[in-house]
Image (cartoon, coloured by chain):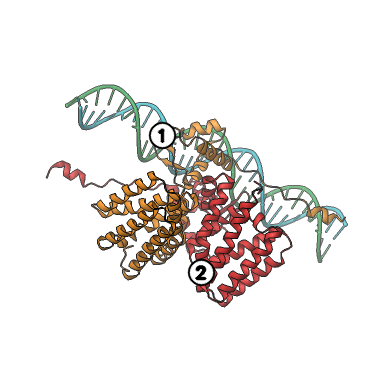
Chain colours: A red, B orange, C green, D cyan
Amino acid sequence: MTSYQFIMTIVPLKSAPSLVEQVCARLARQLRDEMDSGDGRLPPERLMAERLGVSRTVLREATKRLESQGLLEIRHGSGIRAVNRLHKPLSGSLSLLLPEMAERLRQLNETRAAIEPEIARQAALKAKAADVKQLRAIHARMTAADTHDEAVEADIDFHRTLARIAGNEILKLMLESLADLGRESRRVTIGNVGRQRAIDHHTAILNAVAAHDAAAAAKAMKHHLDEATRDLATKPKTKR
Amino acid sequence: MTSYQFIMTIVPLKSAPSLVEQVCARLARQLRDEMDSGDGRLPPERLMAERLGVSRTVLREATKRLESQGLLEIRHGSGIRAVNRLHKPLSGSLSLLLPEMAERLRQLNETRAAIEPEIARQAALKAKAADVKQLRAIHARMTAADTHDEAVEADIDFHRTLARIAGNEILKLMLESLADLGRESRRVTIGNVGRQRAIDHHTAILNAVAAHDAAAAAKAMKHHLDEATRDLATKPKTKR
DNA sequence: TTTTCGTAATTGGTATGACCTCCTACCAAT
DNA sequence: ATTGGTAGGAGGTCATACCAATTACGAAAA
């Protein structure tokens, strides 16, 4: 056995995690373990740093990172609180990846066409009575909306609730991440002319979900998105 | 007009962005504009801080955030360089959302079943000769793989390349983000028994893409993923 | 008693300087 | 040509001081 062979079996040492990394991991773990407690307010920076035995610099860098990950909200003068905005990082990535609006919308619709029929299908398989009731309430809200913003929020809420019912956290997170990207295009797809049709589409989807008809739900969702894609293709005057 | 009506039209002031936010935006913009220059090395922290007219504290917090977003890599003692790891944030979110392994795999497969047939379909519509040639090379690599790790990398590369060919950055990013989640499950799906079958499935997908048969590509991919899901359901002994 | 105003206290944001620790480049010795 | 040692560069951490936004509280006015 030569000395080279001995050296080749030595595994490279892994560098020790920095204090910032350690504090991040610690805080993330605590956030998960105590996620239902109180109003989510965290102690002040200075106190947390002291308790963890690190400098305020380390604590600040750690909290900044967790803010970036969508786990914390930091407010100047108010304090830090726990939030659940895990879609935020992907929204950020997508904005960086696709700065050009037209191409962003094209890819967005293509992506939605891939995932939302499956979401609708799963929702139809899994919906309970309370779920259907909630969908109807949102649907009524969208029907009764007085302003465009109200209609947009109801529309997004409808889709979001389907994702929740579908029970797949990954798809739900993806849809949530896409929501901000798609907000502007809804000005076209559910403007005065398109809104009634969107409402009709939602009705078909809702009925299929209530009836636990997975195939019909997927089909209705696909139809809804195909029509929206067509709208956007024929009305290129969306504002930036 | 009452004074209340006047007050109701006053829009709340938006707080000025902090220096950290401004530096983040500035650096992100510069990273995008100069993304092809050199080895991606950024100047030292102290120098960047001086040039931007801010303290090193602000610069550090900003770079930490950009690291968290997958745009930078920071190495103690070596410096900071630009990277493209936009999938990193979503990978992180997913790990936080789904700590439990079995449920993570179930949802992962469900998600892949939604998006990968569409990726295969688009790839079939858009593939050029060079794309097909690349897929064949990867395929040959997977066929000839001596170790499990080689096979896994080739498998992931095959799927990743289909996503690139498909030309949808959103779907590509999502698939990239899922790759780490799915690495362990491939120990089952392309272990010694399953590998030949996975290779056969890839062959069918590759042939459909080469023939620009979108429907066949989507169908072959769906079949591939359904079989993988079945494998995982019958072999629950995946290691943590 | 209720409402409004002013101020102190709290809490995050920024700057500075010092020092520690890891990594790289370079020179001297073998 | 190779190896070992060291200086210098670059990120990591700490402490302190001060700035800026928000909240809480007490006093004054209605």
SS assignment at label 1: loop
Amino acid at pointer 2: Arg
Amino acid at pointer 1: Asp
From this view, report whether residue A81 is shown above or below residue B132: below
Which quadrant of the view contains residue A223?
Answer: bottom right
Is label 1 on the same chain as label 2?
no
Name the residue at the left extreme: A1
- Which of the image's four quarters has the N terminus of chain A? top left
Chain for mark 1?
A: B
Residue A71 can be seen, yes or no: no
Which quadrant of the view contains residue D25?
Answer: bottom right
Name the side, left or right, on which B153 lies relative to A104: left
Which of the pair A201/A47 is nearer the observer? A201
Name the side, left or right, on which A240 lies relative to A4: right
Q: Residues within 10 Å of mark 1 (few under 14, many from 20)?
A: few
Residue at 39% across, 36% down: B78
Where in the figure is residue B64, as x and y percent of width and height?
Answer: 48, 44
SS assignment at label 2: helix
Q: Nearer the viewer, mark 1 or mark 2?
A: 2
Where in the figure is residue A194, as x and y percent of width and height?
Answer: 67, 60
User: Looking at the rendered structure, which numbered label has been put on residue B39?
Assistant: 1
Q: CA distance from mark 1 to mark 2?
A: 47 Å
Q: Give the labeled residue for mark 2.
A: A121
